[in-house]
Amino acid sequence: MPVRHYVTARIIDGRALGAIIEKGLTNEAEAIEKRGRAPHLVVVIVGDDAASHVYVRNKQRACERIGIKSTRHDLPSTSNPSDLIDLVDNLNKDEGVDGILVQSPLPDGFDEISITEMIDPEKDVDGFHPVNLGRIVTGKVDGLLPCTPSAVIRMLESTGERLAGKKALVVGRSRIVGMPSALLLAQKGVDATVTISHSQSQDLRRLCLDSDIIVAAVGRPGMIKSDWVKKDAIVIDVGINRVEVDGASRLVGDVEKEASERASWVTPVPGGVGPMTIAMLMRNTIKAASDRI
Amino acid sequence: MPVRHYVTARIIDGRALGAIIEKGLTNEAEAIEKRGRAPHLVVVIVGDDAASHVYVRNKQRACERIGIKSTRHDLPSTSNPSDLIDLVDNLNKDEGVDGILVQSPLPDGFDEISITEMIDPEKDVDGFHPVNLGRIVTGKVDGLLPCTPSAVIRMLESTGERLAGKKALVVGRSRIVGMPSALLLAQKGVDATVTISHSQSQDLRRLCLDSDIIVAAVGRPGMIKSDWVKKDAIVIDVGINRVEVDGASRLVGDVEKEASERASWVTPVPGGVGPMTIAMLMRNTIKAASDRI
Protein backbone atom coordinates (compact mmCIF):
# COMPACT_ATOMS: atom_id res chain seq x y z
CA MET A 1 0.00 0.00 0.00
CA PRO A 2 1.48 3.35 -1.00
CA VAL A 3 2.34 5.78 1.71
CA ARG A 4 -0.10 8.70 1.65
CA HIS A 5 0.95 12.12 2.82
CA TYR A 6 -1.84 14.35 3.94
CA VAL A 7 -2.86 16.52 6.77
CA THR A 8 -6.19 15.64 8.28
CA ALA A 9 -8.60 18.44 9.06
CA ARG A 10 -9.19 19.43 12.63
CA ILE A 11 -12.55 18.41 13.99
CA ILE A 12 -15.13 20.92 15.19
CA ASP A 13 -16.50 18.79 17.97
CA GLY A 14 -20.21 19.59 18.34
CA ARG A 15 -20.62 17.46 21.45
CA ALA A 16 -17.74 19.12 23.28
CA LEU A 17 -18.76 22.62 22.23
CA GLY A 18 -22.38 21.90 23.10
CA ALA A 19 -21.32 20.67 26.55
CA ILE A 20 -19.45 23.92 27.21
CA ILE A 21 -22.47 25.96 26.19
CA GLU A 22 -24.78 23.80 28.30
CA LYS A 23 -22.53 24.38 31.32
CA GLY A 24 -23.02 28.12 31.01
CA LEU A 25 -26.75 27.70 30.52
CA THR A 26 -26.99 25.55 33.64
CA ASN A 27 -25.78 28.51 35.69
CA GLU A 28 -28.25 30.80 33.96
CA ALA A 29 -31.12 28.38 34.54
CA GLU A 30 -30.24 28.29 38.23
CA ALA A 31 -30.19 32.08 38.45
CA ILE A 32 -33.58 32.28 36.72
CA GLU A 33 -35.06 29.69 39.06
CA LYS A 34 -33.85 31.77 42.02
CA ARG A 35 -35.79 34.72 40.62
CA GLY A 36 -39.05 32.76 40.62
CA ARG A 37 -39.27 29.47 38.78
CA ALA A 38 -37.31 27.22 36.43
CA PRO A 39 -37.40 27.98 32.69
CA HIS A 40 -40.10 25.90 31.02
CA LEU A 41 -40.07 24.40 27.53
CA VAL A 42 -43.16 22.73 26.10
CA VAL A 43 -42.67 20.29 23.24
CA VAL A 44 -45.63 19.28 21.13
CA ILE A 45 -45.50 16.17 19.01
CA VAL A 46 -48.26 15.05 16.65
CA GLY A 47 -48.44 11.42 15.56
CA ASP A 48 -45.86 8.72 15.89
CA ASP A 49 -42.97 9.46 13.55
CA ALA A 50 -40.17 7.38 15.07
CA ALA A 51 -37.35 9.84 14.34
CA SER A 52 -39.36 12.70 15.84
CA HIS A 53 -39.70 10.77 19.08
CA VAL A 54 -35.93 10.31 19.23
CA TYR A 55 -35.33 14.04 18.61
CA VAL A 56 -37.84 15.06 21.23
CA ARG A 57 -36.32 12.70 23.76
CA ASN A 58 -32.87 14.19 23.10
CA LYS A 59 -34.22 17.69 23.60
CA GLN A 60 -35.92 16.73 26.85
CA ARG A 61 -32.73 15.11 28.11
CA ALA A 62 -30.83 18.31 27.40
CA CYS A 63 -33.45 20.19 29.43
CA GLU A 64 -32.89 17.81 32.33
CA ARG A 65 -29.10 18.30 32.21
CA ILE A 66 -29.49 22.08 32.31
CA GLY A 67 -32.31 22.47 34.79
CA ILE A 68 -35.04 23.47 32.35
CA LYS A 69 -38.46 22.08 33.12
CA SER A 70 -39.86 20.32 30.05
CA THR A 71 -43.38 19.21 29.33
CA ARG A 72 -44.44 17.09 26.44
CA HIS A 73 -47.82 17.09 24.73
CA ASP A 74 -48.58 14.12 22.52
CA LEU A 75 -51.39 14.57 20.02
CA PRO A 76 -52.50 11.43 18.20
CA SER A 77 -51.94 11.26 14.46
CA THR A 78 -55.72 11.28 14.09
CA SER A 79 -56.04 14.73 15.64
CA ASN A 80 -57.15 17.76 13.64
CA PRO A 81 -55.20 20.93 12.93
CA SER A 82 -57.74 22.72 15.14
CA ASP A 83 -56.63 20.59 18.14
CA LEU A 84 -53.08 21.75 17.61
CA ILE A 85 -54.17 25.35 17.08
CA ASP A 86 -56.13 25.30 20.36
CA LEU A 87 -53.17 23.81 22.20
CA VAL A 88 -50.72 26.41 20.85
CA ASP A 89 -53.21 29.12 21.71
CA ASN A 90 -53.36 27.95 25.31
CA LEU A 91 -49.59 27.64 25.55
CA ASN A 92 -49.21 31.18 24.18
CA LYS A 93 -51.45 32.49 26.96
CA ASP A 94 -49.92 30.35 29.72
CA GLU A 95 -47.65 32.59 31.81
CA GLY A 96 -45.83 29.50 33.06
CA VAL A 97 -44.58 28.57 29.60
CA ASP A 98 -41.43 30.18 28.21
CA GLY A 99 -40.79 28.18 25.05
CA ILE A 100 -43.04 26.32 22.62
CA LEU A 101 -41.67 23.83 20.13
CA VAL A 102 -43.90 22.00 17.68
CA GLN A 103 -41.85 19.08 16.41
CA SER A 104 -41.55 18.79 12.64
CA PRO A 105 -42.72 17.02 10.50
CA LEU A 106 -46.46 17.34 11.10
CA PRO A 107 -48.82 14.78 9.56
CA ASP A 108 -50.53 15.48 6.23
CA GLY A 109 -53.24 18.08 6.48
CA PHE A 110 -51.30 20.27 8.92
CA ASP A 111 -49.82 23.50 7.56
CA GLU A 112 -46.47 23.80 9.31
CA ILE A 113 -45.84 27.39 8.29
CA SER A 114 -49.18 28.67 9.54
CA ILE A 115 -48.74 26.80 12.83
CA THR A 116 -45.32 28.45 13.17
CA GLU A 117 -46.89 31.86 12.59
CA MET A 118 -49.36 31.18 15.41
CA ILE A 119 -46.70 30.71 18.07
CA ASP A 120 -46.00 33.81 20.16
CA PRO A 121 -42.70 35.07 18.66
CA GLU A 122 -41.35 35.55 22.19
CA LYS A 123 -41.89 31.84 22.90
CA ASP A 124 -40.69 30.72 19.47
CA VAL A 125 -37.56 28.89 20.65
CA ASP A 126 -37.10 27.23 17.25
CA GLY A 127 -36.64 30.74 15.81
CA PHE A 128 -38.83 29.92 12.81
CA HIS A 129 -41.50 32.60 13.21
CA PRO A 130 -41.36 35.11 10.34
CA VAL A 131 -40.88 38.00 12.75
CA ASN A 132 -37.80 36.30 14.22
CA LEU A 133 -36.43 35.45 10.78
CA GLY A 134 -37.25 38.96 9.53
CA ARG A 135 -35.31 40.60 12.35
CA ILE A 136 -32.19 38.89 11.02
CA VAL A 137 -32.82 40.56 7.66
CA THR A 138 -32.93 43.91 9.49
CA GLY A 139 -29.59 43.17 11.17
CA LYS A 140 -30.99 42.36 14.62
CA VAL A 141 -29.26 39.19 15.79
CA ASP A 142 -29.78 39.33 19.56
CA GLY A 143 -33.22 37.69 19.49
CA LEU A 144 -34.42 34.11 19.12
CA LEU A 145 -32.32 32.87 16.19
CA PRO A 146 -33.08 29.64 14.35
CA CYS A 147 -31.11 26.90 16.08
CA THR A 148 -29.19 25.17 13.30
CA PRO A 149 -28.07 28.41 11.59
CA SER A 150 -26.84 29.80 14.89
CA ALA A 151 -25.09 26.48 15.57
CA VAL A 152 -23.34 26.90 12.20
CA ILE A 153 -22.07 30.35 13.16
CA ARG A 154 -20.95 29.25 16.63
CA MET A 155 -19.03 26.32 15.16
CA LEU A 156 -17.33 28.55 12.61
CA GLU A 157 -16.42 31.04 15.31
CA SER A 158 -15.06 28.26 17.50
CA THR A 159 -12.28 27.64 14.98
CA GLY A 160 -10.76 31.01 15.79
CA GLU A 161 -10.30 31.59 12.06
CA ARG A 162 -10.96 35.04 10.67
CA LEU A 163 -14.33 34.84 8.89
CA ALA A 164 -14.57 38.44 7.62
CA GLY A 165 -14.19 38.60 3.86
CA LYS A 166 -14.07 34.81 3.47
CA LYS A 167 -16.19 33.31 0.71
CA ALA A 168 -18.91 31.14 2.22
CA LEU A 169 -21.11 28.87 0.15
CA VAL A 170 -24.44 27.72 1.56
CA VAL A 171 -25.73 24.69 -0.32
CA GLY A 172 -29.50 24.50 0.11
CA ARG A 173 -32.08 27.25 0.56
CA SER A 174 -34.51 25.88 3.14
CA ARG A 175 -36.39 28.29 5.41
CA ILE A 176 -34.97 26.46 8.43
CA VAL A 177 -31.30 26.14 7.57
CA GLY A 178 -30.05 27.45 4.23
CA MET A 179 -31.66 30.85 3.96
CA PRO A 180 -31.17 31.94 7.59
CA SER A 181 -27.60 30.59 7.63
CA ALA A 182 -26.82 32.78 4.62
CA LEU A 183 -28.32 35.80 6.36
CA LEU A 184 -26.29 35.20 9.52
CA LEU A 185 -23.06 34.66 7.59
CA ALA A 186 -23.55 37.99 5.76
CA GLN A 187 -24.25 39.96 8.95
CA LYS A 188 -21.98 42.66 10.23
CA GLY A 189 -19.61 41.03 12.70
CA VAL A 190 -19.40 37.78 10.74
CA ASP A 191 -18.88 39.55 7.43
CA ALA A 192 -18.51 36.61 5.09
CA THR A 193 -19.18 37.06 1.37
CA VAL A 194 -22.05 34.60 1.06
CA THR A 195 -23.32 32.61 -1.88
CA ILE A 196 -26.64 30.76 -1.72
CA SER A 197 -26.81 27.76 -4.04
CA HIS A 198 -29.59 25.25 -4.65
CA SER A 199 -30.95 22.66 -7.04
CA GLN A 200 -31.02 25.14 -9.93
CA SER A 201 -27.41 26.26 -9.46
CA GLN A 202 -24.92 25.48 -12.21
CA ASP A 203 -21.57 23.77 -11.61
CA LEU A 204 -21.75 23.20 -7.88
CA ARG A 205 -18.27 21.71 -8.05
CA ARG A 206 -16.82 25.04 -9.21
CA LEU A 207 -18.85 26.96 -6.61
CA CYS A 208 -17.45 24.69 -3.89
CA LEU A 209 -13.87 24.95 -5.16
CA ASP A 210 -14.19 28.75 -5.06
CA SER A 211 -15.29 28.79 -1.41
CA ASP A 212 -13.36 29.15 1.84
CA ILE A 213 -16.34 27.91 3.83
CA ILE A 214 -18.95 25.34 2.78
CA VAL A 215 -22.19 24.94 4.70
CA ALA A 216 -23.89 21.84 3.31
CA ALA A 217 -27.61 21.66 4.08
CA VAL A 218 -29.23 19.55 1.41
CA GLY A 219 -30.00 16.21 3.04
CA ARG A 220 -28.41 14.00 0.38
CA PRO A 221 -25.66 11.65 1.50
CA GLY A 222 -22.24 12.53 0.11
CA MET A 223 -23.62 14.84 -2.56
CA ILE A 224 -20.65 17.15 -2.08
CA LYS A 225 -17.62 15.27 -3.32
CA SER A 226 -14.40 15.39 -1.37
CA ASP A 227 -12.43 16.72 -4.35
CA TRP A 228 -14.83 19.68 -4.64
CA VAL A 229 -13.46 21.01 -1.37
CA LYS A 230 -10.81 23.68 -1.68
CA LYS A 231 -7.61 23.07 0.23
CA ASP A 232 -7.89 24.43 3.78
CA ALA A 233 -11.58 25.21 3.48
CA ILE A 234 -13.85 24.93 6.51
CA VAL A 235 -16.68 22.44 6.01
CA ILE A 236 -19.84 22.57 8.11
CA ASP A 237 -21.95 19.54 7.33
CA VAL A 238 -25.56 20.01 8.37
CA GLY A 239 -26.79 16.84 6.65
CA ILE A 240 -27.75 13.90 8.84
CA ASN A 241 -28.67 11.08 6.45
CA ARG A 242 -29.38 7.50 7.40
CA VAL A 243 -27.82 5.03 4.94
CA GLU A 244 -27.40 1.28 4.78
CA VAL A 245 -23.78 0.13 4.52
CA ASP A 246 -23.11 -3.61 4.33
CA GLY A 247 -26.49 -4.27 5.85
CA ALA A 248 -25.90 -1.94 8.78
CA SER A 249 -27.57 1.43 9.20
CA ARG A 250 -25.44 4.47 9.88
CA LEU A 251 -25.55 8.26 9.74
CA VAL A 252 -23.59 10.22 7.15
CA GLY A 253 -23.43 13.86 6.15
CA ASP A 254 -23.96 15.68 2.86
CA VAL A 255 -20.19 15.87 2.32
CA GLU A 256 -17.99 12.89 1.54
CA LYS A 257 -15.90 11.94 4.56
CA GLU A 258 -12.64 12.17 2.58
CA ALA A 259 -13.13 15.95 2.45
CA SER A 260 -11.21 15.99 5.73
CA GLU A 261 -8.07 15.23 3.72
CA ARG A 262 -8.33 18.68 2.11
CA ALA A 263 -10.24 20.86 4.55
CA SER A 264 -8.66 22.69 7.48
CA TRP A 265 -11.71 22.09 9.69
CA VAL A 266 -14.68 19.77 9.40
CA THR A 267 -17.71 18.91 11.49
CA PRO A 268 -18.31 15.20 12.11
CA VAL A 269 -21.63 13.46 11.42
CA PRO A 270 -22.92 12.47 13.90
CA GLY A 271 -21.54 14.60 16.73
CA GLY A 272 -21.29 17.89 14.85
CA VAL A 273 -24.14 20.24 14.04
CA GLY A 274 -26.74 17.96 15.69
CA PRO A 275 -25.73 18.38 19.35
CA MET A 276 -24.93 22.06 18.77
CA THR A 277 -28.43 22.62 17.40
CA ILE A 278 -29.84 21.25 20.65
CA ALA A 279 -27.51 23.51 22.63
CA MET A 280 -28.83 26.49 20.67
CA LEU A 281 -32.42 25.42 21.40
CA MET A 282 -31.52 25.36 25.07
CA ARG A 283 -29.97 28.80 24.74
CA ASN A 284 -33.15 30.15 23.14
CA THR A 285 -35.24 28.65 25.93
CA ILE A 286 -33.04 30.29 28.57
CA LYS A 287 -33.20 33.56 26.66
CA ALA A 288 -36.98 33.45 26.35
CA ALA A 289 -37.28 32.60 30.06
CA SER A 290 -34.89 35.30 31.20
CA ASP A 291 -36.94 37.90 29.30
CA ARG A 292 -40.04 36.74 31.21
CA ILE A 293 -38.94 35.74 34.72
CA MET B 1 -11.44 60.29 -33.70
CA PRO B 2 -11.11 56.52 -34.00
CA VAL B 3 -14.13 54.46 -34.94
CA ARG B 4 -15.33 52.42 -31.98
CA HIS B 5 -17.12 49.13 -32.47
CA TYR B 6 -19.30 48.06 -29.68
CA VAL B 7 -22.81 46.94 -28.97
CA THR B 8 -24.64 49.07 -26.48
CA ALA B 9 -26.70 47.35 -23.80
CA ARG B 10 -30.44 47.43 -24.05
CA ILE B 11 -32.11 49.71 -21.55
CA ILE B 12 -34.53 48.42 -18.91
CA ASP B 13 -36.77 51.46 -18.92
CA GLY B 14 -38.15 51.88 -15.41
CA ARG B 15 -40.48 54.72 -16.41
CA ALA B 16 -42.07 52.72 -19.23
CA LEU B 17 -42.36 49.54 -17.16
CA GLY B 18 -43.72 51.50 -14.22
CA ALA B 19 -46.34 53.12 -16.48
CA ILE B 20 -47.54 49.70 -17.67
CA ILE B 21 -47.84 48.49 -14.09
CA GLU B 22 -49.65 51.65 -13.04
CA LYS B 23 -52.15 51.13 -15.86
CA GLY B 24 -53.08 47.73 -14.46
CA LEU B 25 -53.28 49.13 -10.95
CA THR B 26 -55.62 51.90 -12.12
CA ASN B 27 -58.14 49.26 -13.14
CA GLU B 28 -57.74 47.48 -9.82
CA ALA B 29 -58.18 50.73 -7.88
CA GLU B 30 -61.39 51.38 -9.78
CA ALA B 31 -62.71 47.90 -9.01
CA ILE B 32 -61.89 48.35 -5.32
CA GLU B 33 -63.60 51.73 -5.21
CA LYS B 34 -66.72 50.14 -6.70
CA ARG B 35 -66.72 47.65 -3.83
CA GLY B 36 -66.80 50.42 -1.23
CA ARG B 37 -64.19 53.11 -1.26
CA ALA B 38 -60.92 54.08 -2.93
CA PRO B 39 -57.68 52.56 -1.60
CA HIS B 40 -56.07 54.91 0.91
CA LEU B 41 -52.37 55.48 1.53
CA VAL B 42 -51.20 57.63 4.43
CA VAL B 43 -47.71 59.09 4.23
CA VAL B 44 -46.06 60.43 7.37
CA ILE B 45 -43.14 62.79 7.14
CA VAL B 46 -41.19 64.11 10.12
CA GLY B 47 -39.14 67.27 9.77
CA ASP B 48 -38.07 69.10 6.64
CA ASP B 49 -35.51 67.02 4.80
CA ALA B 50 -35.71 68.45 1.27
CA ALA B 51 -35.18 65.17 -0.58
CA SER B 52 -37.86 63.45 1.53
CA HIS B 53 -40.35 66.07 0.49
CA VAL B 54 -39.56 65.41 -3.18
CA TYR B 55 -39.96 61.63 -2.70
CA VAL B 56 -43.24 62.03 -0.87
CA ARG B 57 -44.58 64.35 -3.57
CA ASN B 58 -43.67 61.77 -6.24
CA LYS B 59 -45.46 59.05 -4.31
CA GLN B 60 -48.57 61.19 -3.88
CA ARG B 61 -48.57 62.04 -7.59
CA ALA B 62 -48.46 58.33 -8.42
CA CYS B 63 -51.47 57.84 -6.12
CA GLU B 64 -53.36 60.55 -8.04
CA ARG B 65 -52.57 58.95 -11.39
CA ILE B 66 -53.88 55.57 -10.21
CA GLY B 67 -56.91 56.61 -8.20
CA ILE B 68 -55.51 55.95 -4.73
CA LYS B 69 -56.53 58.45 -2.07
CA SER B 70 -53.44 59.78 -0.32
CA THR B 71 -53.19 61.69 2.92
CA ARG B 72 -50.10 63.32 4.23
CA HIS B 73 -49.24 63.94 7.87
CA ASP B 74 -46.46 66.42 8.53
CA LEU B 75 -44.87 66.28 11.96
CA PRO B 76 -42.49 69.12 12.82
CA SER B 77 -38.82 68.21 13.31
CA THR B 78 -39.28 69.27 16.94
CA SER B 79 -41.84 66.49 17.59
CA ASN B 80 -41.09 63.57 19.89
CA PRO B 81 -40.98 59.90 18.99
CA SER B 82 -44.11 59.49 21.14
CA ASP B 83 -46.02 61.82 18.78
CA LEU B 84 -45.13 59.56 15.87
CA ILE B 85 -45.93 56.43 17.87
CA ASP B 86 -49.38 57.82 18.73
CA LEU B 87 -50.02 58.73 15.11
CA VAL B 88 -49.02 55.28 13.83
CA ASP B 89 -51.15 53.70 16.51
CA ASN B 90 -54.19 55.66 15.36
CA LEU B 91 -53.52 54.87 11.70
CA ASN B 92 -53.22 51.16 12.55
CA LYS B 93 -56.67 51.29 14.15
CA ASP B 94 -58.26 53.42 11.44
CA GLU B 95 -60.40 51.13 9.25
CA GLY B 96 -60.28 53.75 6.50
CA VAL B 97 -56.49 53.44 6.10
CA ASP B 98 -55.00 50.67 3.93
CA GLY B 99 -51.35 51.62 3.78
CA ILE B 100 -49.00 53.47 6.14
CA LEU B 101 -45.65 54.79 5.01
CA VAL B 102 -43.30 56.59 7.37
CA GLN B 103 -40.82 58.41 5.16
CA SER B 104 -37.17 57.72 5.89
CA PRO B 105 -34.88 59.22 7.20
CA LEU B 106 -36.33 60.19 10.56
CA PRO B 107 -34.65 62.92 12.62
CA ASP B 108 -32.11 62.03 15.32
CA GLY B 109 -33.69 60.46 18.36
CA PHE B 110 -36.20 58.41 16.35
CA ASP B 111 -35.59 54.67 16.13
CA GLU B 112 -36.60 53.79 12.57
CA ILE B 113 -36.57 50.04 13.11
CA SER B 114 -38.82 50.13 16.15
CA ILE B 115 -41.24 52.49 14.36
CA THR B 116 -41.32 50.01 11.46
CA GLU B 117 -42.14 47.19 13.87
CA MET B 118 -45.08 49.21 15.21
CA ILE B 119 -46.86 49.45 11.86
CA ASP B 120 -49.57 46.83 11.33
CA PRO B 121 -47.85 44.35 8.97
CA GLU B 122 -50.98 44.31 6.81
CA LYS B 123 -50.66 48.07 6.27
CA ASP B 124 -46.86 47.98 5.87
CA VAL B 125 -46.77 49.00 2.20
CA ASP B 126 -43.00 49.60 2.38
CA GLY B 127 -42.62 45.90 3.17
CA PHE B 128 -40.04 46.64 5.86
CA HIS B 129 -41.80 45.03 8.86
CA PRO B 130 -39.83 42.00 10.11
CA VAL B 131 -42.84 39.74 9.64
CA ASN B 132 -43.06 40.73 5.97
CA LEU B 133 -39.29 40.32 5.48
CA GLY B 134 -39.35 37.03 7.40
CA ARG B 135 -42.05 35.58 5.17
CA ILE B 136 -39.64 35.92 2.25
CA VAL B 137 -37.14 33.79 4.18
CA THR B 138 -39.85 31.14 4.53
CA GLY B 139 -40.50 31.21 0.77
CA LYS B 140 -43.75 33.18 0.89
CA VAL B 141 -43.55 35.87 -1.77
CA ASP B 142 -47.19 36.76 -2.33
CA GLY B 143 -47.37 39.28 0.51
CA LEU B 144 -46.22 42.87 0.92
CA LEU B 145 -42.70 42.73 -0.48
CA PRO B 146 -40.17 45.52 0.01
CA CYS B 147 -40.55 47.87 -2.94
CA THR B 148 -37.03 48.26 -4.32
CA PRO B 149 -36.18 44.53 -4.14
CA SER B 150 -39.41 43.63 -5.91
CA ALA B 151 -38.66 46.34 -8.49
CA VAL B 152 -35.28 44.66 -9.06
CA ILE B 153 -36.94 41.30 -9.73
CA ARG B 154 -39.59 42.79 -12.01
CA MET B 155 -36.94 44.59 -14.04
CA LEU B 156 -34.87 41.43 -14.40
CA GLU B 157 -37.92 39.46 -15.45
CA SER B 158 -38.86 42.14 -17.97
CA THR B 159 -35.74 41.32 -19.98
CA GLY B 160 -37.17 37.92 -20.83
CA GLU B 161 -33.76 36.39 -20.09
CA ARG B 162 -33.65 33.07 -18.27
CA LEU B 163 -32.66 33.84 -14.67
CA ALA B 164 -32.60 30.29 -13.26
CA GLY B 165 -29.06 29.17 -12.52
CA LYS B 166 -27.56 32.56 -13.37
CA LYS B 167 -24.98 33.95 -10.95
CA ALA B 168 -26.33 37.10 -9.35
CA LEU B 169 -24.19 39.40 -7.23
CA VAL B 170 -25.86 41.78 -4.81
CA VAL B 171 -23.49 44.55 -3.76
CA GLY B 172 -24.62 45.95 -0.43
CA ARG B 173 -26.42 44.27 2.49
CA SER B 174 -28.92 46.86 3.68
CA ARG B 175 -32.14 45.72 5.33
CA ILE B 176 -34.11 47.69 2.75
CA VAL B 177 -32.43 46.69 -0.51
CA GLY B 178 -29.46 44.33 -0.42
CA MET B 179 -30.56 41.58 1.96
CA PRO B 180 -34.16 41.26 0.70
CA SER B 181 -33.04 41.46 -2.95
CA ALA B 182 -30.72 38.51 -2.32
CA LEU B 183 -33.57 36.56 -0.72
CA LEU B 184 -35.89 37.23 -3.65
CA LEU B 185 -33.25 36.30 -6.23
CA ALA B 186 -32.64 32.96 -4.50
CA GLN B 187 -36.36 32.06 -4.30
CA LYS B 188 -37.86 29.19 -6.17
CA GLY B 189 -39.17 30.56 -9.45
CA VAL B 190 -36.33 33.06 -9.82
CA ASP B 191 -33.66 30.50 -8.96
CA ALA B 192 -30.52 32.59 -9.30
CA THR B 193 -27.35 31.51 -7.51
CA VAL B 194 -26.94 34.57 -5.31
CA THR B 195 -23.88 36.13 -3.74
CA ILE B 196 -24.18 38.88 -1.13
CA SER B 197 -21.16 41.18 -1.00
CA HIS B 198 -20.46 44.19 1.20
CA SER B 199 -17.75 46.45 2.56
CA GLN B 200 -15.81 43.51 4.01
CA SER B 201 -15.79 41.51 0.78
CA GLN B 202 -12.49 40.86 -0.95
CA ASP B 203 -11.81 41.57 -4.62
CA LEU B 204 -15.16 43.00 -5.64
CA ARG B 205 -13.80 43.31 -9.17
CA ARG B 206 -13.42 39.53 -9.45
CA LEU B 207 -16.84 38.93 -7.85
CA CYS B 208 -18.41 41.25 -10.44
CA LEU B 209 -16.53 39.65 -13.35
CA ASP B 210 -17.84 36.24 -12.22
CA SER B 211 -21.48 37.38 -12.23
CA ASP B 212 -24.20 37.21 -14.86
CA ILE B 213 -26.32 39.71 -12.94
CA ILE B 214 -25.12 42.62 -10.82
CA VAL B 215 -27.46 44.41 -8.43
CA ALA B 216 -25.62 47.46 -7.16
CA ALA B 217 -27.07 48.92 -3.97
CA VAL B 218 -24.32 50.76 -2.18
CA GLY B 219 -24.99 54.45 -2.68
CA ARG B 220 -21.51 55.40 -3.92
CA PRO B 221 -21.29 57.02 -7.35
CA GLY B 222 -19.51 54.88 -9.92
CA MET B 223 -18.02 52.53 -7.32
CA ILE B 224 -18.50 49.62 -9.71
CA LYS B 225 -16.15 50.18 -12.62
CA SER B 226 -17.32 49.54 -16.14
CA ASP B 227 -14.53 47.03 -16.80
CA TRP B 228 -15.65 44.95 -13.81
CA VAL B 229 -18.80 44.05 -15.72
CA LYS B 230 -18.74 40.71 -17.49
CA LYS B 231 -19.65 40.76 -21.17
CA ASP B 232 -23.43 40.40 -21.59
CA ALA B 233 -24.16 40.70 -17.89
CA ILE B 234 -27.38 42.35 -16.71
CA VAL B 235 -26.77 45.38 -14.51
CA ILE B 236 -29.44 46.68 -12.14
CA ASP B 237 -28.26 49.93 -10.65
CA VAL B 238 -30.13 50.82 -7.48
CA GLY B 239 -27.84 53.73 -6.58
CA ILE B 240 -29.21 57.24 -6.98
CA ASN B 241 -26.37 59.58 -6.09
CA ARG B 242 -26.30 63.32 -6.53
CA VAL B 243 -22.96 64.56 -7.85
CA GLU B 244 -21.58 67.88 -9.06
CA VAL B 245 -20.25 67.82 -12.62
CA ASP B 246 -18.82 71.04 -14.03
CA GLY B 247 -20.75 73.03 -11.47
CA ALA B 248 -24.04 71.35 -12.31
CA SER B 249 -25.79 68.81 -10.11
CA ARG B 250 -26.88 65.51 -11.59
CA LEU B 251 -27.90 62.00 -10.58
CA VAL B 252 -25.67 59.01 -11.21
CA GLY B 253 -25.79 55.36 -10.23
CA ASP B 254 -23.37 53.09 -8.39
CA VAL B 255 -22.12 51.67 -11.69
CA GLU B 256 -20.04 53.60 -14.19
CA LYS B 257 -22.13 54.53 -17.21
CA GLU B 258 -19.66 52.91 -19.63
CA ALA B 259 -20.78 49.52 -18.28
CA SER B 260 -23.42 49.67 -21.00
CA GLU B 261 -20.66 48.96 -23.52
CA ARG B 262 -20.25 45.46 -22.03
CA ALA B 263 -23.57 44.58 -20.45
CA SER B 264 -26.51 43.08 -22.32
CA TRP B 265 -29.03 45.06 -20.27
CA VAL B 266 -28.70 48.05 -17.95
CA THR B 267 -31.04 50.21 -15.92
CA PRO B 268 -30.64 53.95 -16.39
CA VAL B 269 -30.19 56.40 -13.51
CA PRO B 270 -32.47 58.27 -13.25
CA GLY B 271 -35.46 56.53 -14.84
CA GLY B 272 -34.62 52.99 -13.79
CA VAL B 273 -35.16 51.49 -10.37
CA GLY B 274 -36.58 54.76 -8.96
CA PRO B 275 -39.90 54.89 -10.84
CA MET B 276 -40.28 51.11 -10.59
CA THR B 277 -39.92 51.34 -6.79
CA ILE B 278 -42.83 53.78 -6.73
CA ALA B 279 -44.87 51.43 -8.94
CA MET B 280 -44.20 48.60 -6.45
CA LEU B 281 -45.33 50.86 -3.59
CA MET B 282 -48.55 51.48 -5.48
CA ARG B 283 -48.94 47.75 -6.06
CA ASN B 284 -48.51 47.08 -2.33
CA THR B 285 -51.11 49.72 -1.52
CA ILE B 286 -53.60 48.16 -3.94
CA LYS B 287 -52.81 44.74 -2.50
CA ALA B 288 -53.31 45.91 1.09
CA ALA B 289 -56.56 47.62 0.11
CA SER B 290 -57.94 44.67 -1.82
CA ASP B 291 -57.38 42.46 1.23
CA ARG B 292 -59.48 44.89 3.30
CA ILE B 293 -62.18 46.29 1.05
Image: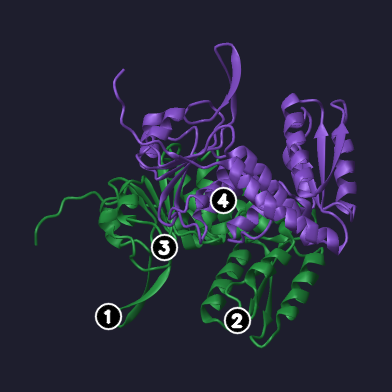
Chain colours: A purple, B green
Kindly give the residue lying farthest to the bottom in the view shown.
Answer: B78
The answer to the question of whether label 1 and label 2 lie on touching residues, with beta carbons closer than 8 A, is: no
* Of the image marks 1 and 3, the number of the one nearer the N terminus: 3
The amino acid on which the numbered mark 1 sits, given as a three-letter code, is: Asp
**Which residue is denoted by mark 3 in the rendering?**
B199
| Mark 1 and mark 3: Cα distance apart in space | 30 Å
Q: Is residue B26 visible?
A: no
If you read the primary sequence from the N terminus, does the residue marked by circle 1 or circle 2 appear first? Answer: 2
Q: Name the amino acid type tagged 3.
A: Ser
In percent of width and height, residue A283 lies at 70, 52
Give the alpha-carbon distance from disc 2 to disc 3, as whole Å. Answer: 25 Å
Residue that badge 4 annotates: A154
Say which of marks 2 and 4 sits in front: 4
Q: Disc 4 sits on a residue from what chain?
A: A
Q: Quadrant of the C terminus of chain A?
A: bottom right
User: Residue at the spot x=58%, y=68% of the render?
Assistant: B59
| Chain ID, mark 1 | B
* Residue denoted by label 2: B108
